[in-house]
Amino acid sequence: MSAERLQYVTPLPPLPTGIAQYSRDLLRALGGAWPLDIVGEAGSNPAPFVNPVEESGTRTTSFRRGVPTVFQIGNSGFHRLAFKHALQESGVIVLHDVMLHHGRSGELLRAGGAGYQRVMRSRYGAKGAWAVAEILAGRAVDDFGVYPLSEDYVERAIVTIVHSEFARRQVLRFVPDANVVVVPMGVPLPALVDQSAARIALKLPERAFIIASITHVNPYKRMPIVLRAMRRLVAREPDAILIVAGSVAPGIDLKRQVSLLNLERNVRLLGYVTDDEARLAARAADVCVNLRFPSAGETSASLLRLLGAGRPVLVTDDPSIAEYPRDAVLPVAVDRFEDEMLADLMLLLARDRELRDAAGAAARSFIEREHSMLDAVHGYRNVIQAAFGVQLPESPGMAVHEPDPTVSASAVSPVRYSALDARIADALAGLRLAGHDATIHTVAQAAQRLRLDCAQPSENEWTSDEQVSADS
């Protein structure tokens, strides 16, 4: 079947999701060498990956039944085609989040609550029906992890690809007889830009101790903990600086949090940044922080990119961290001492340059060894061959490094969301949907068009949507 084409269903930039960036990097590495028919989720732009000359290369198409298909699936509303067709077609699914509850519930509720109730009851029995009733009544459900809503996709798939052994074990817990294969995520190695040059480009002090958070800020990223730790740190390192490079979910007022802690001098909120600016921010930093709790069973692309940039990273101590080298990541327990422990680790790294350098080197080495783009492509090739019998060519000129960043600080131009977005985010918080910014913004726009909003948006605005250059 070497002449057969492969269908590839995925979000792509400019969609504000880390999986769009993941597919962009994978397709860029392949360079059109595989016979792929890209089926982009709504809002995707596949044009940069299409080869108009080579008939055997990459093309775009609408979804076709009965064709060998790879589905990229994550826990968001950017996977409508995959959510629909991966239940109808037996293909290869790439499961970026073991828990798909938020993304799927949004799709099911779009068609009315009856479908959501039916799926939850059939899969989880009386407990699932109770959870739906609580959610539809606007009450919080403590643990969505027991209702992952990913099982039927795994059961339907010929093979399920995940990016960590932790995720594989989680999938098998829910579907014990599933065919689950771990394939490295594939992280293009960032250029090792000189730290001084990166700081000059971003207008940061050349001699300060700098911590960077480079991710979309939502309630799970524990930014209040990070800010409280910074307050402790500056009492002993007054010139320390935290840069937050990433957009902020509606309803989170970081400026106010910074002001309440009297940290205006020590915290720089860059807002949404381009890929190049995110790379420069990582290289400008001495240390990075990437907290996340609770987890949806995902492999964090933002964390892997920080490690690839050669920076030690402060992370949340959960079972998934066991696969990361302890000489590269510094885990912080989620307990009442979390901010104190985080501050102590920041101080340790601030005062020990050799430790920072050694941890950064170990971080970069880990990405080269465990999550190289070359190994990721080989993993995909092996899975696809086993699933479909499709022979895919080698890609000798594969792009395994990111291009050198070229950027000016003035390029930062955050997209704005209104105060109405924040009010809708507050209303959805009880349903655990407050982090789904694209959905929130769409609802807010519709409310305004239908004149359902009680007042016009105020001047108080928040920067928007998921940091494309950071997370999955």
Image (spheres, rainbow, N blue to C red):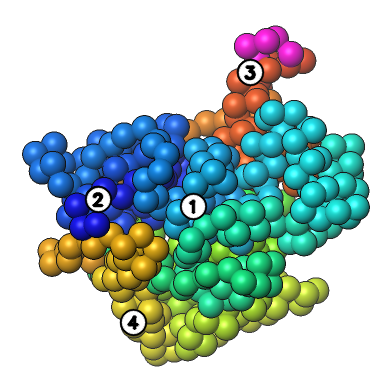
The location of residue 153, given as percent across then percent down, is: 59, 54
Q: Which mark is residue 4?
A: 2
Q: Identify the residue at image location x=69%, y=28%.
A: 111
| Mark 1 or 4, closer to the camera | 1
Q: Quadrant of residue 135?
A: top right
Q: Are marks 4 and 3 in contact (CB under 8 Å)?
A: no
Q: Amino acid at mark 2?
A: Glu
Q: Are marks 2 and 3 in contact (CB under 8 Å)?
A: no
User: CA separation, marks 4 and 3?
Assistant: 48 Å
**Which residue position is annotated with label 1?**
90
**Residue drawn at x 64%, y 54% as measured from the top left:** 152
* Of 282 and 321, the residue lying toward us: 321
Between circles 3 and 1, the one closer to the viewer is 1
Dot 3 or dot 1, earlier in sequence: 1
Q: CA distance from mark 2 to mark 1?
A: 16 Å
Q: Nearer the viewer, mark 2 or mark 3?
A: 2
- On screen, residue 197 above or below 73: below
Indicate left or right for 338 with 203 as reference.
Answer: right
* Residue position marked by numbered label 3 in the rendering: 446
In space, the residues marked 2 and 3 are separated at their CA atoms by: 43 Å
Foreground of the two, 334 or 60: 60
| C-alpha gap between disc 2 and disc 4 | 32 Å
- Residue kind at label 3, given as amino acid type: Ala
Q: Amino acid at mark 1?
A: Ser
First-in-chain label (4 vs 3): 4
Q: Main secondary structure of the magenta part?
A: loop
What's the distance in space between the residues labelled 1 and 4, CA to CA?
Answer: 32 Å
Task: Say which mark, if any, is on residue 170.
Answer: none
Amino acid type, label 4: Arg
